[in-house]
Every structure is written in structure tokens, then in C-alpha cells.
């Protein structure tokens, strides 16, 4: 950004990011309830990978369906984006 301060486009980007995060949190919660990963008190990396496998592809498909999110996710790049995001999130 070349000029400091807030502009209208900054607010648009911020609300878009917030709404995308809300969708992801909702899918993560549903995935955790379906996989019963919230019933255990300790950290289990396998259950985390199950949650990633359940929620991330549908989240990216939702972003694609509403033509929202990163510019590289539109069109034929959806499959590549799903695979890339899935692998990067599962290694976190």
C-alpha cells in the first residue's frame, strides 16, 4: 500500500476475510463434531488431519462457488488450490 491509512477498499477486504474465516470456523466445528475429535482432551494429530480433510475441501469449494477468496482459486485452478491448501494446512 502506497498511502497509509484506511480506505473503503480496505474495509471490503477486511469484511471479506472475516466472512471467509467465519465459514471456515463453522466447517471446522462441524467436522470436529462429526469426527468426534472434540471429545478427547489431548492433542491428536491424526484427528486434526481428519478435520482438515473434512472441512478444507468444502470450504475451498464454497469460496469457489461464490467466486470469493484468493484470485488463483477461480476456474480450473480449484483442484490445484484444494490440493495445495490441504497439504499446507495438514503440515501446520
Image (cartoon, helix red, strand yellow):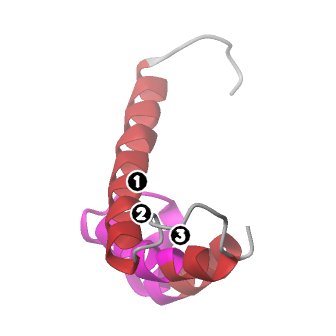
Q: Position of residue 14 (x, y in %)?
A: 46, 32
**Mark 3–mark 2 distance (CA, rounded to whole Å):** 23 Å
**Mark 3–mark 1 distance (CA, rounded to whole Å):** 22 Å
Q: Residues within 10 Å of mark 2 (few under 14, many from 20)?
A: many
Q: Which mark is residue 25?
A: 1
Confirm whether the magenta stretch covers residue 68.
yes
Disc 2: which residue: 28
Q: Position of residue 30 (x, y in %)?
A: 31, 66
Disc 3: which residue: 72
Choose top left, top right, bottom left or bottom right for residue 43. Answer: bottom right
Residue range of the region highlighted in magenta in the rendering: 51-79
Up the image or down, 22 lies above or below 75; here it is above
Which residue occupies the foreground of this view, 22 or 39? 39
Which residue occupies the foreground of this view, 4 or 85? 85
Q: Quadrant of the N terminus?
A: top right
Left or right, 56 with respect to 5, comes to left
> At 34% from the left edge and 43% from the top edge, which residue is drawn?
19
> At 45% from the left edge and 36% from the top edge, which residue is drawn?
13
> At 45% from the left edge and 42% from the top edge, which residue is drawn?
17
Q: Residue furthest top?
A: 5
Q: Residues within 10 Å of mark 3 (few under 14, many from 20)?
A: few
Q: Secondary structure at mark 3?
A: helix
Q: Position of residue 62 (x, y in %)?
A: 30, 68
Q: Secondary structure at mark 1?
A: helix
Q: Position of residue 52 (x, y in %)?
A: 52, 75
Left or right, 25 with respect to 49, comes to left
Amino acid at each position: 500500500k502506497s498511502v497509509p491509512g484506511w480506505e473503503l477498499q480496505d474495509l471490503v477486504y477486511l469484511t471479506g476475510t472475516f466472512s471467509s474465516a467465519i465459514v471456515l470456523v463453522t466447517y471446522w466445528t462441524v467436522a470436529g463434531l462429526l469426527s468426534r475429535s472434540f471429545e478427547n482432551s489431548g492433542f491428536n494429530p491424526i484427528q486434526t488431519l481428519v478435520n482438515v480433510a473434512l472441512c478444507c475441501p468444502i470450504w475451498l469449494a464454497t469460496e469457489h462457488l461464490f467466486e470469493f477468496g484468493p484470485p488463483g482459486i477461480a476456474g480450473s485452478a480449484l483442484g490445484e488450490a484444494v490440493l495445495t491448501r490441504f497439504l499446507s494446512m495438514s503440515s501446520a
